[in-house]
Image (cartoon, rainbow, N blue to C red):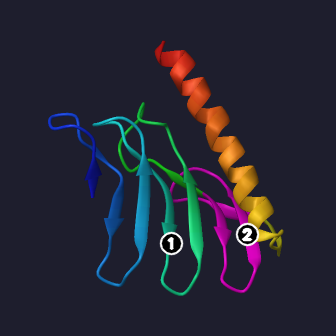
């Protein structure tokens, strides 16, 4: 799925045959994968170069599992390793924290771009 005006469309979402949905952010041509929601309730979160690096260079940083467990990862793409696991915090609190983090990242990106 794409959004934006003709000629400046940006890639925002991909729906896979199994029902999983990948979400992307970034300007046209510099999109990066933010998360993938799986049909059984697991969500994988990614960080990457924010459009400055090679496409597909995002690395796994967190998994929120359907059973409420959260796993945190570190390492380069393809070599991520789990460094912490535990029970999920309140879903609403986690969403609020994530949104605040994204706002801060987007503000930083806007400042960088001028």
| Mark 2 vs 1, N-terminal side | 1
User: Residue at 27% of width from left, 58% of height from top?
Assistant: 1
Q: Residue at x 62, y 42 (%)?
A: 102
When the figure is inspected, residue 15 is found, relative to residue 34, above or below; the finding is below
Q: Which span is picked out in magenta?
A: 61-83
Q: Nearer the viewer, residue 107 or 55?
A: 107
Query: In the rendered structure, are the residues bearing label 2 and label 1 in contact, judged by CB atoms less than 8 Å apart?
Result: no
Q: Is residue 96 left or right of residue 42?
A: right
- Quadrant hosting residue 31: top left
Q: Which mark is residue 71?
A: 2
Comparing labels 2 and 1, the label whose residue is closer to the camera? 1
Q: Is residue 85 magenta?
A: no
Q: Residue furthest front?
A: 5
The one nearer the camera, 47 or 10, is 10
Q: Which residue is mark 1?
A: 37
x%, y% of residue 112? 53, 17
Furthest-left residue in this view: 7
């Amino acid at each position: 799925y794409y959004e934006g005006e003709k000629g400046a469309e940006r890639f925002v979402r991909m729906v896979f045959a199994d029902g999983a949905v990948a979400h992307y952010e970034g300007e046209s041509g510099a999109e990066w994968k933010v998360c993938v929601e799986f049909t059984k309730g697991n969500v994988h979160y990614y960080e990457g170069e924010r459009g400055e690096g090679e496409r597909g260079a995002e690395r796994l940083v967190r998994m929120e599992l359907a059973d409420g467990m959260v796993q945190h990862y570190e390492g380069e793409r393809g070599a991520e390793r789990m460094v912490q696991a535990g029970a999920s915090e309140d879903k609403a609190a986690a969403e609020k924290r994530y949104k605040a983090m994204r706002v801060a990242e987007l503000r930083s990106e806007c400042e960088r771009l001028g």
